[in-house]
Structure formats: C-alpha cells, structure tokens
Image (spheres, grey):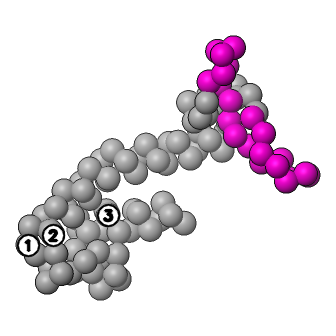
C-alpha cells in the first residue's frame, strides 16, 4: 500500500502535478511556492528513477527470501532475515539462501 502511495504521489506529479495536488498527495504552489514545486518535482524524478525500482526489487527479493534483501550479517558470514513465526507470534533470525 505504501509503495502504491509513493508511486502515485511521486511519479504522477511528474506527469500532472495538479492531479496530485487535488488528491492531496503534494502541496499546492500557493503553499510551497514555485521553487517548492520544482523541489518536489526533483525529488519525484529521483524517487521514480532510483528509489521506487530499488524498493520494488527489495520487496520482491524479501518475499523470495533472497540474501540481497536480508538485513543482517552475523559473524559466521551468513545473511539472515528477521522473520515472524505465525505459530507462536515472535520474531527470529532466519537464514537466507
């Protein structure tokens, strides 16, 4: 859900800034000035080109439990993922492939 909001708020502002303002995903030009709109669009370009693809790749790799998406390296050199075991509802470190 957060990815969809980020995509709609940032990427759509490159296409039609007024649409994102009407959806209240960006601030209007009266609130942030013309410089602020340019600043928002610059962040939108960076998010669209870099952040959103990396976020999507990370989510997909996390769901597949691949090592690139794992968050911690123990001293044994293995990658681990903080996972939630549904049966007893606690977090544990699971070794990634």
Give yes or no for residue 22 being in the magenta stretch.
Answer: no
Q: Residue furthest right?
A: 87
Cα distance in 3D space between marks 1 and 3: 17 Å
The reply to whether dot 1 and dot 3 touch (C-beta < 8 Å) is: no
N-term mark: 3 or 2? 3
Tell me, yes or no, whether the highlighted magenta stretch contains residue 90. yes
- Discs 1, 2 touching: Cβ within 8 Å: yes
Left or right placement of residue 58 versus residue 25 in this view: right
Part of the protein shown in magenta: 73-93
Q: Which of marks 3 and 2 is in front?
A: 2
| Mark 3: secondary structure | helix
Quadrant where the image shows the N terminus: bottom right
Q: Quadrant of residue 26?
A: bottom left
Question: How far, Cα to Cα, is label 3 from label 2?
Answer: 12 Å
Report whether 16 appears left or right of 30. right
Q: Name the residue under label 2.
A: 37
Q: Residue at x 8, y 72 (%)?
A: 34
Q: Closer to the camera: disc 1 or disc 3?
A: 1
* Image-based side of 17 in relation to 53, left or right: left
Q: Which mark is residue 34?
A: 1
**Residue at disc 2, secondary structure:** helix
Image coordinates of residue 24 in percent, x first then y, are: 34, 81
Image position, residue 52 (x, y; %): 40, 51
> 55 above or below 20?
above
Query: In the picture provided, is 65 more to the left or to the right than 56?
Result: right
Report the residue marked by disc 3.
10
């Amino acid at each position: 859900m957060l990815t969809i909001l980020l995509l709609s708020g940032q990427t759509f502002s490159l296409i039609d800034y007024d649409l994102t303002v009407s959806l209240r995903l960006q601030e209007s030009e009266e609130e942030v000035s013309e410089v602020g709109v340019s600043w928002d669009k610059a962040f939108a370009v960076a998010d669209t080109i870099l952040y959103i693809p990396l976020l999507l790749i990370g989510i997909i790799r996390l769901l597949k439990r691949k090592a690139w998406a794992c968050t911690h390296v123990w001293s044994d050199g293995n990658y681990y993922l903080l996972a939630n075991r549904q049966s007893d509802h606690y977090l544990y470190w699971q070794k990634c492939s």
